[in-house]
């Protein structure tokens, strides 16, 4: 299992920014520059790459789902991600 090395700044965003922005990202509430920035972070950040691949595939499947189905998928995705964030929280 890969250790989470904590928050890092990649592509102008911190990992915590990604987690914070992800629900808006999924809901399509971010504007294009913000989405591009999130994508850059997900591509380059080794921390986020772990679940970034899952996020990408889930986002891809979301875009093929009807809205009433995607809400459930989104809820599940956010559950996975918050569990991930909880596990990765540094002990201070
Ligand atoms: Zn990251």
Image (cartoon, helix red, strand yellow):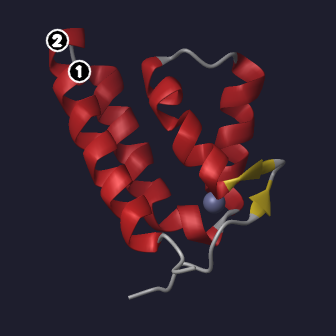
Query: Is the N terminus in the top left, top right, bottom left or bottom right quadrant?
Result: bottom left
Question: Residue placed farthest to the front in the image?
Answer: 92
- Viewer-proximal residue among 77 and 32: 77
Residue drawn at (30%, 28%) of the image: 62
- Viewer-proximal residue among 17 and 68: 17
Q: Secondary structure at mark 1?
A: helix
In the image, ligand 1 is in what quadrant? bottom right
Q: Which residue is mark 2?
A: 68
Residue drawn at (23%, 21%) of the image: 71
Q: Tell me whether the residue at label 2 lies in contact with that at label 1, contact meaning CB atoms closer than 8 angstroms.
A: yes
Q: Determine which quarter of the picture holds residue 21.
A: top right
- Give x and y (percent) for residue 84: 37, 62
In the image, residue 35 above or below residue 89? above
Q: Which residue is mark 1?
A: 71
In the image, residue 79 above or below residue 89? above
In the image, residue 26 above or below residue 86? above
Locate residue 79 relative to residue 13 in the image: left or right.
Answer: left
Residue drawn at (79%, 60%) of the image: 9
Q: Determine which quarter of the picture holds residue 68.
A: top left
Mark 2: few, some, or many residues within 10 Å (few <14, many ≥20)? Answer: few
Q: Determine which quarter of the picture holds residue 38.
A: top right
- Give x and y (percent) for residue 15: 64, 56
Q: Which mark is residue 41?
A: none
Query: Is the C terminus in the top left, top right, bottom left or bottom right quadrant?
Result: bottom right
Residue drawn at (72%, 28%) of the image: 34
Distance, label 2 to label 1, CA atoms, is: 6 Å
Q: Secondary structure at mark 2?
A: helix
Mark 1: few, some, or many residues within 10 Å (few <14, many ≥20)? Answer: some
Locate residue 20 relative to residue 40 in the image: left or right.
Answer: left
């Amino acid at each position: 299992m890969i250790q989470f090395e904590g928050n890092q700044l990649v592509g102008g965003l911190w990992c915590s920014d990604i987690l914070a922005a992800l629900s808006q990202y999924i809901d399509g509430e971010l504007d294009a520059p913000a989405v591009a920035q999130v994508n850059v972070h997900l591509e380059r950040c080794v921390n986020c790459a772990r679940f970034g691949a899952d996020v990408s595939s889930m986002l891809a499947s979301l875009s093929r789902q009807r809205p009433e189905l995607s809400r459930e998928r989104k809820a599940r995705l956010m559950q996975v991600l918050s569990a991930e964030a909880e596990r990765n929280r540094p002990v201070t």
